[in-house]
Amino acid sequence: MKRGIVLKLFLLTTALCMLIIAVIFIGQTLFFKQFYVHQKVGDVKAALQSYKNDYLKNATDAQTASRLEREFDQTYNTWIAVLDSKGNLQNTEDYFMTIRLDRMDDNPEFSGREIKIPLYKFMNVEDFYSENTFIYPWIKEGEPIVVEGLNMDKQLVIQRMGRSVANLRQEDQLENRQMVSKEYEVVPRFPSPVQYHEKYPNVLAYGTVTDLHIPEGAESSRYTNHLFLDRIKAFQAELLYGDYDHARNANHMMDYEENHLKYKIFVNHIEDINGNPAYLFAMTSMQPVSEAAGVMRHYYVYVVIVTLLLVLLASFYYSRRIARPLLRINRTTQQMAGLDFSEKIPVTTKDEIGDLSRNINELSERLQSHILRLNKDIEKEKQLEHTRKEFISGVSHELKTPLSVIQSCLAIVKDGVAIHKRDYYFKAMEDEVKRMDLMISDMLELAKYESGTYQMHTESFYIDTVIERICAKLAVDISDKQLHLHTSLEPVEVVGNELRIEQVIVNFLTNAIRYTPNQQSIIVTTTEERNSVKICIENKGTHIEGEQLEKIWDRFYRGEASRQRSTGGTGLGLAISKQILEMHGVSYGATHSPDGVIFYFYLNKKA
């Protein structure tokens, strides 16, 4: 039994723990990456909303914009930039070149204009700080320059720049590769290249570099992330060629992969500080997700091994700890089944097992109490049977005598013997009938009290008034025996059934009158205590033997064994008084005094 439950608990606990580990491992393998991506995307989206507010409030120049972008990258590991409605980086006044257009071959409307060209589209900022010879020496103020591009909605979109027309196709030219690549992608959509150039005419312009600005220090870091800048330029190409739907992609997210590395790109359509259309462009790497997932798979090998050892140890301890009180409970209940309630289960916990142990202990106590009570009831039933036999014997004896007297008197009257005593015999029969009627009334009243169906209604009354009234009623009986009645009563209000308490006092006082010798004294007193009153009735000159003192409350008991009818009474008065006092729930009794017997009982005072 012990080994069985311990083994079952051990196996169950181990299996449960291993199942949990397996579920965690499988969930980690299958869903961790998706959860990580979802969490990352949610965090970036929330951060973009916060960045938009900060940018619109603070980014008034390139230096502030660069600082905000760096702080965002450091906090969220995400590159971010704000683009204008044409897809150009905002706040690029620290890295640009200004060209004055002197001559246009096919588009004279651009002639004489000065155009500001962001240099991040054409060259790396590191080239200006290279220790080697700068490969673009012609990019400086006052030098001539040739630009080639497209006329898109009367806006010059530059694709290439060089120091001459021939240089536009050589290695040291400047080229916006994303725009050029996009053009190769868009041209096949038209029936012929001619139709393409009708929509997007070529522009070839000659000009002079009039201004050149290069970022210095930390601000230059804004232009060193070439992967991010390439994505911005690619987005601009999509935007200029109309491949980006503003309405459908107000808040757009796309996937991008470069060199087997995955990225998420976010594009939010916003309004800049001046209320013009703009774009919040962000890009974050998903590489940490793959790295974390790979590390976790290797890490879980060691976690499973260590956890398995801990699970085995914990399961063994847990199973033993749980099984020990259960085995003790089993042993105790087996003893209870054998009616041995001596052992109690120690309650050391406040959990369900502790409650079970406590309930079993309570059950054991109740069973033991009920068994003891049952044994007492059996003894009481035996005693009751004995009492019943005595009762039948007493009734038979008590009724047999008056019936015999009546039968004898009737025979004498019928035979005409002693006719002069005819009235005497009729008086004797009348007395016996009255005695039998009184006995039957007492027997019925006692049976009513003992049945348990009688309801005792209580009220408050003054005990001294009741005693004085009873003494006045019995004054003739007291006077006939020349007895001296002494009373010492206190006016105390008590709670009880006044009529039944009066019956008790009448029984006690009548009993005292009957057994007190002539010219002796009867003393009635009330003594007030804290919450109760003690009522005593003492008769002088009479004693009751010690063994008889306990039997006087029984039915048909008289102090003399002969049960002579001359002593009077039915032998039920004290038994009736006993039942009344017990229904009141008060103490009562009889005891010897120095020269007599005292009957007493208590009543509760009114609160």
Image (spheres, rainbow, N blue to C red):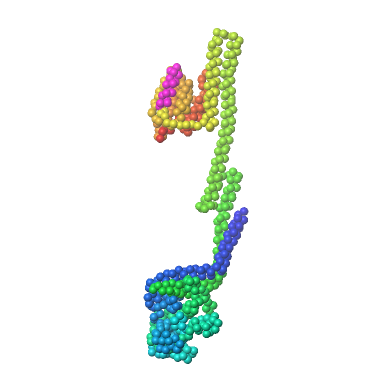
Residue 304 x %, y %: 56, 67
The front one of 291 and 258 is: 258
The front one of 234 and 192 is: 192
Find residue 100 and report its image quarter.
bottom left
Secondary structure mostly taken by the magenta-highlighted segment of the chain: helix
Find residue 337 and report its image quarter.
top right
Residue 285 x %, y %: 49, 74
Residue 603 x %, y %: 44, 31
Q: Is residue 333 visible?
A: yes
Side of 112 where 10 appears, left or right: right
At a point 40% along the width and 80% down the height, the residue shown is 92
The front one of 221 and 546 is: 221
At a point 55% along the width and 10% down the height, the residue shown is 422
Side of 363 where 213 appears, left or right: left
The front one of 17 and 340 is: 17
At a point 38% along the width and 72% down the height, the residue shown is 57
Compared with 593, 285 (above or below) is below
Is residue 467 located in the magenta-colored stretch of the structure? yes
Magenta region: 464-480
Is residue 34 located in the magenta-colored stretch of the structure? no
At a point 47% along the width and 26% down the height, the residue shown is 503
